[in-house]
Image (tube, helix red, strand yellow):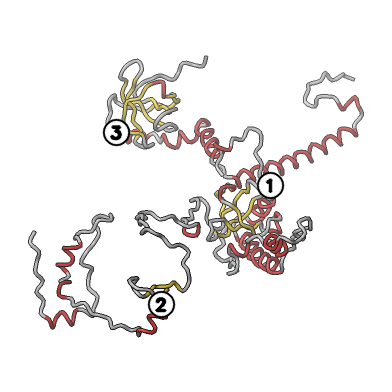
Amino acid sequence: MAPKAQKKPQGKQMAKSSAPHKPKNSAINASRLMKYSRARIFQRKAAYKVKKVKTPAKKSAEKAAAAAAFVVKKIGGDKNGGERKVYKKTPKSLPTQVASRKVQLRPKKTFKKHVRRIRSNLAPGAVLILLAGRHKGKRVVLLKQLESGLLLVTGPRKLNGCPLRRVSQRYVIGTKTRIDISKVALPERLNDAYFRRQRSAKKSAASAGGSADIFAKSDAAYAVSAERREDQAAVDKALMGAIKASGDGPMLRSYLRSLFSIKSGQRPHAMVF
Amino acid sequence: MGKLDKFVEVGRVAFIANGKDSGKVCAIAEIIDQNRVLIDGPCSGVRRQVCDMKRLHLTRFCIDLPHSARTAVVRRKWTAAKLDEKWKETSWAKKLEARRLRTNMSDFDRFKLARAKQIRNSIIALAAGKIRKEAKAKPNALRFRKPNKKRHIKKE
């Protein structure tokens, strides 16, 4: 196909350039392919008319020299070029060959960038059955999913002793029972950093220094921080209100207090939770 | 063996026991051969189709259908005979419904059921305890008598 010559009068082009117009290229059918190739778009946009503006050299020669990684030094002797570039700070590697660049089509995703999924039946306000850990068998309320993907749950502590806690989706059965927690305001500070396990400073110093007594008792007994008490009380109060407000209030309370177990004749794969 | 009163006939209402559409009732529109019939259940969501007799369990209901009646006729006769209500009132349908509810109970429902049973049993136990206590108060001779047994009363 012969390329179309875009003949726009100069005046109009100047006026139009400020306002954004519809994109000239678009993807075909939600794929990665574009309707027009790069060459065609060059023609369509009349990019050959656009003058390349040369940006003036901002840095002066001295600044450039200061910013450079090496210093040019004069050397004696004849027939050896007379000067050498000396590195100010020796780089970590001085390769003898140009490293071949492997094209990273799909670069490695760091843990932070991993996609966090959540099971469809786990929504805030759902009652969960914990299957493992200290609180196994307890029925708890799901508050939200944290950024790491772990679920934030609470007993409420008053009912079954389970505090504000992180829990993995994998060790949980999501039941159909839901509590409306839209009116429960969770404190802003409840995130992964808040629940992160604290390593005692002594231990880390010892590992770094190497001179500390390795037989010394490392961690003191875990003590609940005032922050935790405060947040637990606030969340539980709101949650107890929500439980009371829901249809099956008293039954829900005793339900959350009870423990889950498989009875004789019950088949978990055939049960609806 | 029960009474041989349920016949495979045109108009017989049958329950589909397995396969597609299992759990639904339909009417027999035509008999094809020894093993197969043409069924139709427009009011219960069963498409007009050939069905093996092995899949069908006959009910005690029968509607007055001309053989090879088309779907519209079946629907008309079915609604006139009020089969939907009649079927729901049978203990068969009630048992099916109870089974369905039982399998679809959520964890919370199961808890509520267990709690309700507990409460009922405690009421029964209390009442039974009272009766036992009263019975203990009676002399032994009268205690072990069956209350409703017809006794020969001595004429004075």
Mark 1, mark 3: which one is toward the viewer? Answer: 1
Residue A73, disc: 2
Vertical order, A134 against A243 (above or below): above
Kindly identify the amino acid type of the residue bearing the numbered disc 2: Lys
Report the chain holding disc 3: B
Q: Nearer the viewer, residue A179 or A10?
A: A10
Q: Which corner quadrant of the image does residue A55 belong to?
A: bottom left
Kindly identify the amino acid type of the residue bearing the numbered disc 1: Leu
Mark 1, mark 2: which one is toward the viewer? Answer: 2
Nearer the N terminus, badge 1 or badge 2? 2
Q: Which corner quadrant of the image does residue A179 belong to?
A: bottom right
**Residues at circles 1 and 2 in contact by the CB criterion of under 8 Å:** no
Residue at 19% of width from left, 60% of height from top? Answer: A37
SS for callout 1: loop
Give the percent coordinates (x, y) of residue A106: 38, 54
Q: Quadrant of the N terminus of chain A?
A: bottom left
Look at mark 1 in the image and give the residue it sits on. A259
Drawn side of residue A4 relative to residue B68, left or right: left
Residue at 83% of width from left, 39% of height from top? Answer: B130
Q: Are marks 3 and 2 on the same chain?
A: no
Q: Quadrant of the C terminus of chain A?
A: top right
Look at mark 3 in the image and give the residue it sits on. B71
Vertical order, B101 against B39 (above or below): below
Report the chain holding disc 1: A
Estimate the spatial distance between the alpha carbons at disc 3 and disc 2, rounded to whole Å: 102 Å
Q: Nearer the viewer, residue A128 or A47?
A: A47
SS for callout 2: strand
Q: Nearer the viewer, residue B65 or A129?
A: A129
Residue A216, disc: none
